[in-house]
Image (spheres, rainbow, N blue to C red):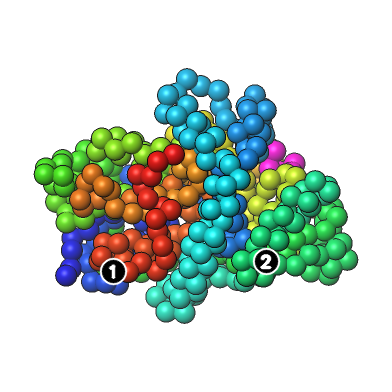
Amino acid sequence: MSKNIVIIGGGIVGLSSAYFLQKEGHQVTVIDKSDISSGASFVNAGYLTPSHIIPMASPGKITQGIKWMFNSSSPFYMKPRWDTDFFKWSWYFHKSSTNAKVEKAIPVIKDINILSRDLFEGIKASGDLGDFQLERKGLLMLYQTQKSYDHEMEVAEKASFLGLEVRELNQSQLAEMEPNIAIDAKGAIHYECDGHTTPTEFMPKMLQYLKNAGVTIKTNEEVLDVVIKANKINEVRTSKQVYSPDEIVLAAGSWSGQLSKKLNIKLPLQAGKGYRINVSRPTGISMPAVLMESSIAVTPMNGFTRFAGTMEFSGINTYIRKERVAAIAAGAKKFYTELEITNEEIADAKTGMRPVSPDGLPYIGKSKDVENLTFATGHAMMGWSLGPATGKLIAEIIDDTKTSMNIVAFNPQRKF
């Protein structure tokens, strides 16, 4: 039965949800407070990463964050501030950062990443969006120290055990794979299972497809309030009009926590800010790579090479910390010794905020308190990678059909 569905949020998760819901015959409206041309869905590394099986909440992460708290250029920065929501989230993050919980999360993260990678390929094969970059070259984890190598080999062994394609590369093999740029690294772990895209290409194509398919896209329109009657959302009130949908999907990224408060629902969520630098001239880089000691993601996209990274917890804001952008440029130089990122390229840096749950797993599922509300948020650094999978699962949840995978681990109101 066709339903009238409002999706709050026009990022990769919201648009992917709209894509699969309209395929099932629903009348879909996407509402976003921006013009859907910036933010996390546009500035990310574009990775499809089955290899990223370790959640952000892992042993030692909080300790590392505290050590780096007073270094605003550090890869994992937590700005000191009095914020009770952040204190609670930090405590839940600490509780989630155990070996037992990480081991439990690993197969779940792998499964949803593979589902999403396959769905990206299905979208491309359908021709709905026309042509767009979708490559399966894999991902290089470049390391300069024995410590980083040992750490990544532990992950690689787990990935290999789970059936993911991974191999070691020595310096000569690395030079053979990347012959057009000098790399200062002892070697690499090559996750052949991974892929990459160009977000700034994919997002406009998806938007245009949805409009052509009859999805209503409302931009520069902010959700101000919701009216609940008999445990159901009766009205969604925005800065421009009032909606009375059958179902609501909350896919508002880092703003999802604020909107949840309007529903009297506690959704532990923090905005994790990331930055990107684009270099729109030949770099010689042909392989996506993570520069381990620098904590930087590098992606050869359509028309430019992107350098992205950092995780900054400083609340919801779009302020660009110049020292963090400079750290990305300097970190890239440590590995690509011939690369010179210019002051103009640094000045053109952009930022986006990722919605981070305390345990590193997304919130995907029905609310237990509000009958017609479904959550689709909290993806942390894997939002791009998991967009299509989340959209597919949302359509299955709303249609009350068997989901493509077990979603118990993504329960939006799980205990921490």
Number of the label disc, if any, that sits on residue 401:
1
Number of the label disc, if any, that sits on residue 160:
2
The stretch drawn in magenta includes residue 329? yes
* Main secondary structure of the magenta stretch: helix
Residue 220 vs residue 378, the one in the foreground: 378
Q: Position of residue 270 (x, y in %)?
A: 46, 37
Quadrant containing the N terminus in the rendered view: bottom left
Residue that appears at 54% across and 60% down: 107
Against 8, is 1 above or below? below
Q: Quick check: can you spot residue 56?
A: no
Magenta-colored span: 327-333
Dot 2: what SS? helix
Q: Residue furthest top?
A: 82
Q: Tell me, yes or no, whether the two marked residues, 1 and 2, touch with CB atoms within 8 Å.
A: no
Residue that appears at 11% across and 44% down: 230
**Marks 1 and 2, Cα distance to the nearest angstrom?**
32 Å
Q: Position of residue 77 (x, y in %)?
A: 60, 33
Q: Position of residue 281 (x, y in %)?
A: 69, 58
Residue that appears at 63% across and 28% down: 66
Amino acid marked by disc 2: Ser
Q: Position of residue 372 (x, y in %)?
A: 21, 52
Residue 238: image quadrant is top left
The stretch drawn in magenta includes residue 316? no
Residue 29 vs residue 82, the one in the foreground: 82
Against 196, is 257 above or below? above
Dot 1: what SS? loop
Residue 214 vs residue 253, the one in the foreground: 253
Amino acid marked by disc 1: Thr
